[in-house]
Image (spheres, rainbow, N blue to C red):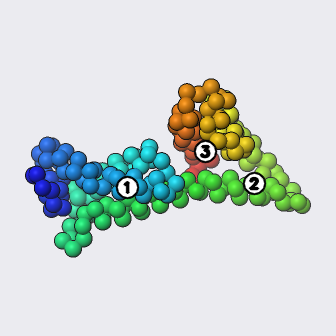
Amino acid sequence: MNSFSDSDIIEGMLSEDDRLVSESLKRLYKTCGQMITQIVCTNGGNLHDAEDLVQEVLLTFRSQLLSGKFVHQENVRLSTYIYRMAMNQWITILSRRNADTRRIAEFFVRTEVTDPDPHMVFLDSEETNTFRAVFSKLSPIEQELLRQYYDSKEPLEKIAAQLNMKSTDAAKMMKHRTMLKLRGLIKKYLGTI
């Protein structure tokens, strides 16, 4: 299998020979990994998000192959199909992330009403307390990082220096992990948003 065609890759992935499956996945990764990384990094994601998406797409594709859901058509290149899959999955991920942002933004818009309904004041107060309770589950350094980044609009370089972090990349990674943790806490305590 020196020269891999789409048919060779599909045949290898359907094989019961682990070596052939592995070779086919590696070839597909080489063919599509950079393309998926570009989709993610040019549309609001980072390299970590891209790596996750590459793995997710390849595993989903193999699952579709094994279940018979994917039927290879000679006139459609495998890379085109994978590209569409990656784009659709990335759009889904972004829409989930934006749902969190939209809900919080809607909350703050509602609190700016000048003459609120007393019932709404009660509900907003309850929601504020819930948001604060969820936020307080983060460590003090995680809370401070998010406050500086989102509330004070400080650049990560400055935040890294103020919080005595090793580098800007360390601050960036911590922000990413903290946001994932916060999303998990929001889902746990507030349900799906």
Does residue 154 appear to the left or right of 169 in the view shown?
right
Does residue 172 appear to the left or right of 53 in the view shown?
right
Which residue corresponds to the image point at 23% horizontal and 47% vertical from the top-left?
26
Image quadrant in which you'd find residue 18: top left
Quadrant (top left/top right/bottom left/bottom right) for the C terminus: bottom right
Mark closest to the chain's N terminus, 3 or 2 = 2
- Residue highlighted by disc 3: 186
Name which residue type carries label 3.
Ile
- Residue highlighted by disc 2: 108
Frontmost of labels 1 and 3 is 1
Name which residue type carries label 2.
Phe
Does residue 155 appear to the left or right of 77 in the view shown?
right
Mark closest to the chain's N terminus, 2 or 1 = 1
Dot 1, crowdedness within 10 Å: few (<14), some or many (≥20)? many
Question: In terms of secondary structure, where does tag 2 sit?
Answer: helix
Dot 3, crowdedness within 10 Å: few (<14), some or many (≥20)? some
The reply to whether discs 3 and 2 touch (Cβ–Cβ < 8 Å) is: no
Question: 187 or 56, which lies in front?
Answer: 56
Name which residue type carries label 1.
Ile
Residue 36 tag number: 1
